[in-house]
Image (cartoon, rainbow, N blue to C red):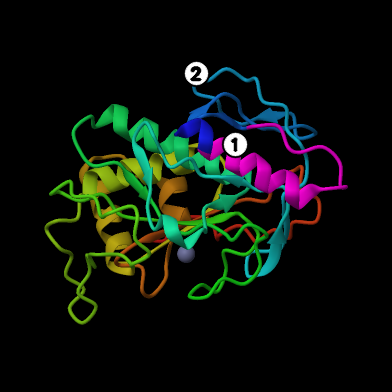
Amino acid sequence: MAFMIRWVYFVAVLAALAGCGPAPESFFVGNEMVGVPDRAGEGTRFPAKGLPELFSFVGEQAIGFYSEGSLVSPSAFPLEGEGFVKIQRPRNRSWGADELIGTMILAAREVARAYPVGERLQIADASAFSGGSLPGHASHQNGLDVDLVYYRQDHREQAADTSSGFEEDFVNTSTGAISPNFDLERNFALMRALVSSGWINRIFIDEALKAAFCRLSVAQDRFEEDTETLRRLRHWPKHGDHLHVRVKCPFTSPRCVAQDEPPPGPGC
Ligand SMILES: [Zn+2]
């Protein structure tokens, strides 16, 4: 099955690239990530966290800005792997840049190993095959944005094979109350894992959830070391039922238009 998925993907990529040079090398073999992209020129490597660095990066993927851009030579999120599952599959919005996909997979794995009991990280919309405007989203255009489902206390996963939206809103927008089903600790572990990659520009969440993470950090006596994580958690309306992760422009995508860094400080 995994082979078939990769095969279909490669055929799609080959078709898209016909006459435009070689197809990109794989970031994955089946659902196994076998390599990590190299930010050549910046002198830094994607933090591999124990993964073999076999990946030979193919070049440009993200073009333009998050809300006005496109995607070339896209990679696809695998349907599932250690600690994650792709949902809303029939939407065919599983395309993105390698840095986006790799960062999510590594963070999901890190959380799954720290919290072996629990549902997988549910990965929702990324981009369309060629990027561009995506109904229902203002951004998600250049392969560097993805929506994720918050971890739940009841560990339930929604069905992967439907296009329907997020099943649970964790914030009462009139009172700001957070559902007891919101797994605060595991979700904060995810935020920390994501930001520690160095690839995160911003993570959009509901403001009540941001405030709760600020309080948790203080309660755990980790406020100082959490500054960078908290700094990148940005209030955005309608993000009580999912979080939206935005990664930085890959160095190998020279036409990608960067977004300003968020202001310094935790913003609590
Ligand atoms: Zn989004």
Instruction: Report x, y in % for residue 175.
Output: 17, 78
The reply to whether residue 266 is in sight is no
Q: Residue at x 20, y 45 (%)?
A: 219
Give left or right: position of 137 versus 267.
right
Instruction: Report x, y in % for residue 13.
Output: 69, 46
Query: Separation of disc 1 and disc 2 at Cα?
Result: 27 Å
Q: Which residues are magenta?
A: 5-26
**Residue wearing tag 1:** 7
Give left or right: position of 81 versus 158.
right
Which is more toward the observer, 56 or 247? 56
At label 1, which amino acid type do we have? Trp
Question: Is label 2 in a helix, a strand or a loop?
Answer: loop
Q: Residue at x 59, y 36 (%)?
A: 7
Query: Is ligand 1 within 8 Å of the beta carbon of the residue shown at mark 1?
Result: no
Per the rendering, the mark at residue 50 is 2
Using the image, determine if residue 81 lies above or below residue 204.
above
What crowding class fits label 1: few (fewer than 14 Cα within 10 Å), some (14-19), or many (20 or more)?
Answer: few
Q: Earlier in the sequence, mark 1 or mark 2?
A: 1
Instruction: Report x, y in % for residue 71.
Output: 69, 57
Which is more toward the observer, 121 or 32? 32
* Residue 25 on the magenta span: yes
Using the image, determine if residue 104 lies above or below residue 262.
above
Q: Are marks 1 and 2 in contact (CB under 8 Å)?
A: no
Give left or right: position of 132 versus 41.
left
Eye-nearest disc, 1 or 2: 1
At label 2, which amino acid type do we have? Gly
